[in-house]
Image (tube, rainbow, N blue to C red):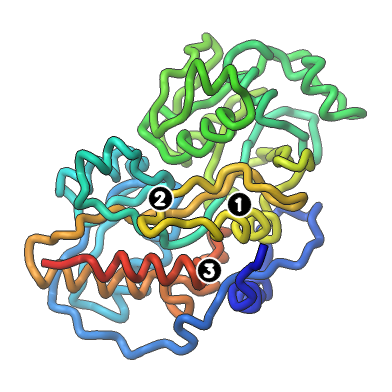
Amino acid sequence: MKLNSKWFAGLAAVAAVGVVAGCGTSNTSSQTQNTSTANTSQPAASVAKTTLTETGSSLLYPLFNAQWIPAYHKLHPDVEMTAASTGSGTGISDAIAGTVDIGASDAYMADAQIQQHPDMLNIPVAISAQQVMYNVPGVKGHLHLNGEVLAAIYEGKIQYWDDAKIKALNPGVKLPHQVIKPVVRSDGSGDTFLFTQYLSKSSAEWNQNYGYGTTISWPGLQTEIGAKGNQGVVAALSKTPYSIGYVGISWLDKAVQQGLGYAALENKAGKYVLPTSATIQAAAQVGVQNVPADERISLIDEPGANSYPIINFEYIIVKDDQPNAAKADALKTFLMWAINPSEGNSAKFLTPVHFLPLPASVHAKSEAQIEKIKG
């Protein structure tokens, strides 16, 4: 397979800033993203005074709220921006309803949604990932887990941490005979979409009985704990010994600071890998070869010995037809800034949340979609 050498050359720039914190078991040097699409910052284009509103992904929220909005406002003080961590499901529905200008989502819209709302664009702005985290007192290092075992845990077929199937993946690790308490998202969540897609690709039984989506009908275990947002999952895990849950990578540092562990997950090649910039990139460089024009694509469980299995595009969901030219121009200018590898897609913004920038081929597709916005 011919891979994009320009992407790899530019990826080294982000790697120089640092690999994913806390993932010390991987010594592979990271490469991170093409700068050929925009090697120098351009003067800020003039944008009329306007307000842009956003709701959605709690995974994208730390980048959007703490990184992008303050920096963009300095460049364009006449543009006021607000962001709210509501979960991807709400972000998508708000964007469709037109109650916000931007919906942020870890999940792309389903075919049925696109058929009902063909005016909606799904625009990737970065590459992200998700880790499986746990609170198991006394267990050090990174447990090995796979999709089949995780599906059995969330179905209630594996109930104790010292179950034979978990022990088989972790020889030599002393696991407690304690009930596992699965944490799930109670809101419509792109993280749920990613996690259950991994389970569906790993377990035919899970796929048949539960499938995947931003919301699903969970098995409803008595030990199940619901939490809203990544922040809620981290809080639930922190205060609940012997719990397990799925958390977007932008929350990794905060979770580790609270004493939570995270797993090395089995990939398609049968290797157990941690979510580092190198392993996320390894998966992405395969997945990005097949991105369609509308950019709706799963990057879950890509092949490769070093590929991390749960990665995704972070999407901006917007209408292609805006109420007026001023709003359309403000959206287009912001989104072009966000995907520019010298600006919003640079290591300065992405490294603190452990995201990777868009490769050149995807950048071009996102740019083409942004150009469709009119008013």
Does residue 341 appear in this view?
yes
Q: Which mark is residue 253?
A: 1
Q: Is residue 243 left or right of residue 195?
A: right
Q: Position of residue 17 (x, y in %)?
A: 64, 73
Circle 2: element type: loop
Question: What residue is rendered at 13% in x and 78% in y?
Answer: 48
For the residue pair 155 and 70, the one nearer the viewer reads as 155
Specify which label sits upstream in the sequence, 3 or 2.
2
Q: Which mark is residue 359?
A: 3
Marks 3 and 2, how far apart at CA: 16 Å
Q: Position of residue 128 (x, y in %)?
A: 53, 54
For the residue pair 11 and 170, the one nearer the viewer reads as 11
Residue at the far right: name it.
172
| Residue matched to label 2 | 296
Residue at the far left: name it.
324
Quadrant where the N terminus lies?
A: bottom right
Q: Which mark is residue 190?
A: none
Give amino acid for label 2. Arg
Marks 1 and 3, how far apart at CA: 25 Å
Question: What residue is rendered at 29% in x and 51% in y?
Answer: 103
